[in-house]
Image (spheres, coloured by chain):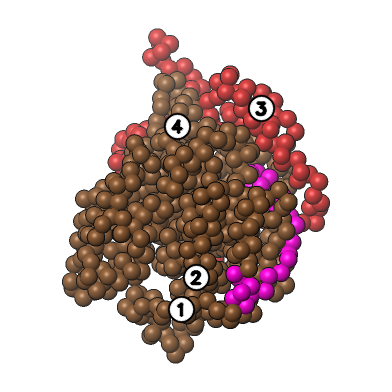
Chain colours: A brown, B red
């Protein structure tokens, strides 16, 4: 198989071929690394990968091969190469968070999400580049240099999970893990023309995700298709004793949402058949093609605050095309309002830096990472280590967070932002309580911009304007490719109520099928 | 609310970040510009609105009140900048002079 043809395979296709013995796990690893070399994923090229070890990945592939030979269930992701954002703790490969302060650091433990991927047969092939500590929207804030967008190397891939989005867009892996705090999976997914999911807060364990803003952080997934993303999320989702904010709500088989209707009861009479699908022993039934009844009875909200007069008319047009497709599949599109959404950026850029200033206090040169000791005592060591270890944006946000939490400013900024966050959450509760099943918006106000084009910090923050509300409210959201504007991808965002990823995927599958090749034109 | 240079130096000290003079000037402008965008929040009436500190919507059950040992596959010594006898070694507090430097 050529590296290019490998890059077009979905995760489910790879896994079923590997389980059936038609392809070997090591062939999948070799094809992934060959594709990475072909596309120039290293630091002299697109700078997608920070760390990889082909031999270690091949050793992991051998272990999966032995599981198949011994007739053990190899897992629903058997032999699927996966890339991981470099702020998710992994055994074997370093975890640097794109920061100089963690250069060379190898975690002594592994994130639950990675452990679950491995248990399902997935093969970790690389850690991907990112904005330092996930602070950024372009992957230009990495201490290891910017990542370039595989679709146009003059452009950024978005951020902060830019390396993961670029790995999927370049056909190196069908799935990658990223992380979200304010849109860091969905925005790069939109810029790179792939699918990106931010799950409900609590849906995926944060154990092993290096903390940025703990009340907002979630591990998310990127996939070449909706099916790749659904398969990845149902693998990593679910309760974890190691994360006190992890939810014990049931995890449906999201891939079945493509068939329409509600999620089948895993404890009902079909339990055995559903379990066979969940673990990959039997395939998911092929959904019927889109029809006028595919989304019958579904109400989709179109919030006016996300379609302002200033929105790029070309982006508006591709969004309207998607809304037309929803209507043609039987859905009702209703004009709605999320009136406090324009306040979300100020709220987010108070709360996230405040939490970051606390979380990043642990990087002090004592227990791990960089130590710079000028020989003038403990405080001087702290200051030298942190000022040389953190880049400009991380420094800016730590200072901003320290300021809004400091005496005299706490009430005016931090407490105020927490109260307005309540109002933003109320907006979503009100809409979903009024019979709306999902909300549709553009994922970003622009397409990918050129490397170096944005130097003003607040202008960069505005990239999150359509994504950050879902993080503040804790609701799930997905970005799917819905077309191109001036040859660059545009993402459409579907937001649903807490823990209703099933409906989110149902609409995403339907839109992807209805748009077909138009999603990438 | 404009941030002053003294504010920047004060919060840098609180955050244990070494910030030199030129950088302090630049940060004063940057933080003031960012915070100016936050002023819009002051116009929102939140007198009777509770704060949101977290968004765990459901199903975050209490767990058994027992500690879970960390699953460490590498030792602290393998990544700590300096350790001895199971303790992290740090520079001395600078509240008193180093005898070696003062010639005592």
Q: Position of residue B44 (x, y in %)?
A: 79, 49
Q: What whole-number distance in Å separates the C-alpha atoms at marks 4 and 2? A: 46 Å
Q: Which residue is mark 4?
A: A389
Disc with the residue nearer the chain's start (4 vs 1): 1
Label 4 Cα neighbours within 10 Å, binned few <14 / some 14-19 / many ≥20: many
Separation of marks 2 and 3 at Cα, in angstroms: 49 Å
Rendered residue at 30%/38% (across/down): B85
Residue range of the region highlighted in magenta in the rendering: A325-351
Q: Is residue B18 visible?
A: yes
- Looking at the rendered image, the disc whose residue lies closer to the viewer, 2 or 3, is 2
Label pair 4/1, CB-CB below 8 angstroms: no
Check disc 2 and report the residue beneath it: A513
Q: Is residue B52 left or right of residue A485?
A: right
Discs 3 and 1 lie in a common subunit: no
Closer to us: A44 or A245 = A44
For label 2, the crowd category at 10 Å Cα-Cα, with few meaning under 14, some 14 to 19 and many 20 or more, is some
At horizontal 68% and vertical 64% (from top left) the residue drawn is A302
């Amino acid at each position: 198989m050529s590296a290019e043809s490998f890059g077009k395979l979905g995760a489910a296709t790879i896994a079923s071929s590997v389980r059936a013995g038609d392809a070997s796990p090591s062939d999948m690893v070799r094809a992934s690394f060959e594709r990475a070399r072909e596309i120039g994923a290293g630091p002299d090229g697109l700078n997608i990968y920070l760390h990889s070890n082909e031999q270690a990945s091949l050793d992991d592939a051998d272990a999966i091969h032995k599981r198949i030979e011994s007739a053990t269930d190899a897992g629903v992701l058997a032999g699927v190469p996966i890339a991981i954002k470099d702020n998710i703790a992994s055994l074997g490969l370093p975890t640097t968070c794109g920061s100089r302060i963690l250069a060379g650091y190898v975690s002594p433990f592994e994130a639950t999400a990675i452990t679950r991927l491995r248990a399902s047969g997935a093969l970790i092939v690389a850690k991907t580049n990112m904005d330092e500590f996930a602070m950024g929207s372009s992957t230009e804030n990495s201490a290891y240099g910017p990542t370039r967008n595989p679709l146009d190397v003059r452009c950024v891939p978005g951020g902060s999970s830019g390396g993961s989005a670029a790995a999927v867009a370049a056909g190196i892996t069908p799935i990658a893990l990223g992380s979200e705090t304010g849109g860091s999976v969905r925005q790069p997914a939109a810029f790179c023309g792939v699918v990106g999911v931010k799950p409900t807060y609590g849906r995926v364990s944060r154990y092993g995700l290096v903390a940025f803003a703990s009340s907002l952080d979630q591990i998310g997934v990127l996939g070449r298709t909706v099916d790749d993303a659904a398969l990845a999320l149902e693998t990593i989702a679910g309760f974890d004793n190691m994360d006190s904010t992890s939810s014990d709500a049931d995890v449906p088989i999201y891939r079945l949402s493509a068939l329409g209707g509600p999620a089948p009861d895993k404890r009902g009479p079909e339990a055995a058949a559903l379990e066979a699908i969940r673990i990959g022993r039997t395939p998911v039934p092929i959904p019927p093609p889109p029809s006028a009844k595919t989304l019958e009875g579904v109400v989709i909200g179109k919030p006016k605050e996300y379609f302002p007069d200033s929105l790029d008319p070309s982006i508006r047009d591709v969004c309207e095309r998607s809304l037309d497709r929803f209507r043609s599949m039987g859905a009702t599109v209703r004009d709605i309002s999320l009136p406090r959404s324009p306040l979300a950026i100020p709220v987010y850029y108070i709360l996230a830096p405040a939490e970051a200033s606390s979380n990043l206090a642990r990087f002090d040169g004592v227990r791990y990472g960089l130590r710079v000791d000028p020989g003038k005592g403990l405080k001087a060591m702290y200051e030298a280590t942190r000022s040389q270890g953190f880049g400009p944006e991380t420094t800016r946000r730590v200072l901003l967070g320290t300021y809004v939490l400091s005496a005299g400013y706490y009430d005016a900024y931090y407490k105020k932002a927490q109260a307005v966050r309540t109002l933003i959450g109320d907006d979503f509760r009100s809409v979903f309580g009024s019979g709306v099943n999902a909300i549709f918006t553009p994922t970003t106000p622009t397409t990918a911009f050129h490397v170096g084009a944005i130097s003003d910090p607040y202008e960069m923050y505005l990239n999150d304007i359509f994504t950050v509300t879902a993080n503040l409210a804790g609701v799930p959201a997905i970005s799917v490719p819905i077309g191109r504007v001036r040859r660059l991808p545009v993402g459409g965002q579907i937001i649903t109520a807490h823990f209703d990823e099933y409906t989110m995927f149902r609409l995403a599958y339907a839109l992807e099928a209805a748009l077909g090749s138009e999603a990438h034109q | 609310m404009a941030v002053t240079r003294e504010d920047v130096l004060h919060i840098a000290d609180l955050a244990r970040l070494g910030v030199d003079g030129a950088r302090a000037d630049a940060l004063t402008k940057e933080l003031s510009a960012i915070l100016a965008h936050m002023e819009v929040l002051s116009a929102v009436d939140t007198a009777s609105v509770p704060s949101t500190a977290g968004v765990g919507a459901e199903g975050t059950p209490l767990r058994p009140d027992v500690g879970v040992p960390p699953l460490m596959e590498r030792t602290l010594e393998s990544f700590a900048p300096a350790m001895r006898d199971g303790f992290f070694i740090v520079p001395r507090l600078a509240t008193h002079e180093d005898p070696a430097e003062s010639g005592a």
